[in-house]
Amino acid sequence: MKDAFGAPQSLLILGGTSEIGLATARRLIARRTRTVYLAGRPSEALDAAAEQLRALGAEAHAVPFDALDPASHEEVLGKLFTEGDIDMVLLAFGVLGDQARDEREPLAAVHVAQVNYTGAVSASLVCATALQQQGHGALVVLSSVAGERARRANFIYGSSKAGLDAFTQGLADALHGTGVHVMIVRPGFVRTRMTAGLDEAPLATTPGAVAAAIELGLRRRSATIWVPGTLRLVMAALRHLPRPLFRRLPV
């Protein structure tokens, strides 16, 4: 359960080495979150991330989890909920892919779709069911402004995020009134390992800024947050721009 200050006492991060996920964990640990599960493929990085959170005073556990193995999600994630209530689930895994390569190699494009959409749908539904059964909690899903309108430069990644975003909106409606808070996070360009080497987009942000926005959104019980907030207005305009004009934009 959340404590008297509204902070979740337990957190499950799907994508346990995610820079945004770990920045969120550190921020919440400072606000009394005490148990953190880092779910991801077994690796030294996952173990190191758990150890870093333990050094901050949390009880942190590395949990083997593979987004590309939906058949295992019910067993792996469901088991965590049987060990005690989880106040917040943050779905933070995803792959950017390589647009040029993915257009040439359909199986590579399918990999992006399977991780970002299929795996996320499976994991979200398993966690949503468990949160609903316990009668409280939050499911926070990292979407992207890339899903708002397909761009030539990354439409494969963007389309996978568009599907995830639409799915999460519907899931939020399905869970309305159950005690489960669903929140969609739409960051712009985030400076992380995943985007290293790419040309930086306008209004770029950081994992720490996204984490701060997530914390604020939780307190406000927001349905959707944009990071930075200015992107809400920018994308409202771009969403309705005629396609011939949109093609000419350097985005």
Image (cartoon, grey):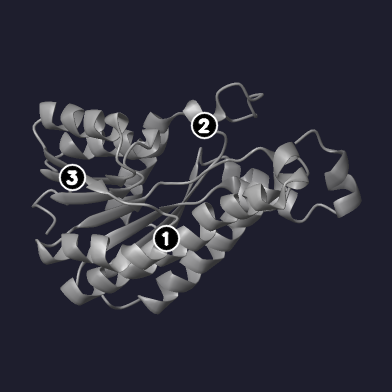
The C terminus sits in image quarter: top right
Residue placed furthest toward the top: 197
Q: Mark 2: few, some, or many residues within 10 Å (few <14, many ≥20)? A: some
Mark 2 element type: helix
User: Closer to the N terminus: mark 2 or mark 1?
Assistant: 2
- Between 178 and 109, the one lying in front of the other is 109
Mark 1 element type: loop
Residue 61 found in image quarter? top left
**Circle 2: residue type:** Met
Residue under circle 2? 194
**Circle 3: residue type:** Val
Residue under circle 1? 223
User: Closer to the N terminus: mark 1 or mark 3?
Assistant: 3
Image position, residue 145 (x, y; %):
59, 47
Q: Nearer the viewer, mark 2 or mark 1?
A: 2
**Circle 1: residue type:** Ala
The residue located at (13%, 62%) in the rendering is 85
Taking 111 as reference, is 173 left or right? left
Location of residue 99 with respect to 121 vertically, above or below: above
Q: Mark 1: few, some, or many residues within 10 Å (few <14, many ≥20)? A: some
Residue under circle 3? 36
Mark 3 element type: strand
Image position, residue 58 (x, y; %):
11, 37
